[in-house]
Amino acid sequence: MKEFEPYKKPTTSEKIVATIRIDIETLEEIDKLAGQIDVSRNELINQCIRYALDNLKNKETRGEKEND
């Protein structure tokens, strides 16, 4: 699995508002990292979600073959 590397990028895709509940400690960690790399909390969370989805061990759950 490739290592997660957050990055600063321009927002180009359409987004919708979604509400989630998150532990305070996790949010504090996200805010700290977002500040260190100068991206918004929202952008970092989106990158984390994308990374997690791209690196799921059981890709069959997403309808993908395991051999990619």
Image (cartoon, helix red, strand yellow):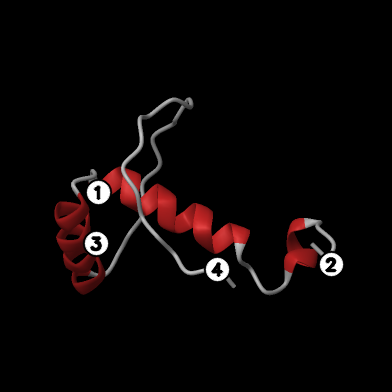
Badge 4 element: loop
Task: Point out the frontmost of discs 4 and 3.
Answer: 4
Q: Nearer the viewer, residue 16 or 67?
A: 67
Badge 3 element: helix
Q: Which mark is residue 41?
A: 1
* Mark 1 or mark 4: whose residue is earlier in sequence: 4
Q: Nearer the viewer, residue 6 or 18?
A: 6
Q: Nearer the viewer, residue 14 or 37?
A: 37
- Measured as percent of width and height from the top left, residue 52 is found at 53, 63
Drawn side of residue 60 relative to residue 6, left or right: right
Task: Point out the frontmost of discs 1 and 2.
Answer: 2
Alpha-carbon distance for marks 3 and 2? 32 Å
- Measured as percent of width and height from the top left, residue 34 is found at 21, 54
Alpha-carbon distance for marks 4 and 2? 16 Å
> Residue at horizontal 81%, vertical 58%?
64
Read off the residue under disc 4: 2
Task: Point out the frontmost of discs 3 and 2.
Answer: 2
Read off the residue under disc 2: 67
Q: Residues within 10 Å of mark 3 (few under 14, many from 20)?
A: some
Read off the residue under disc 3: 30
**Amino acid type assigned to the residue bearing label 1 in the image:** Arg
- Measured as percent of width and height from the top left, residue 53 is found at 59, 59
* Mark 3 or mark 2: whose residue is earlier in sequence: 3
Depicted 47 relative to depicted 57: above or below: above
**Amino acid type assigned to the residue bearing label 3 in the image:** Ile
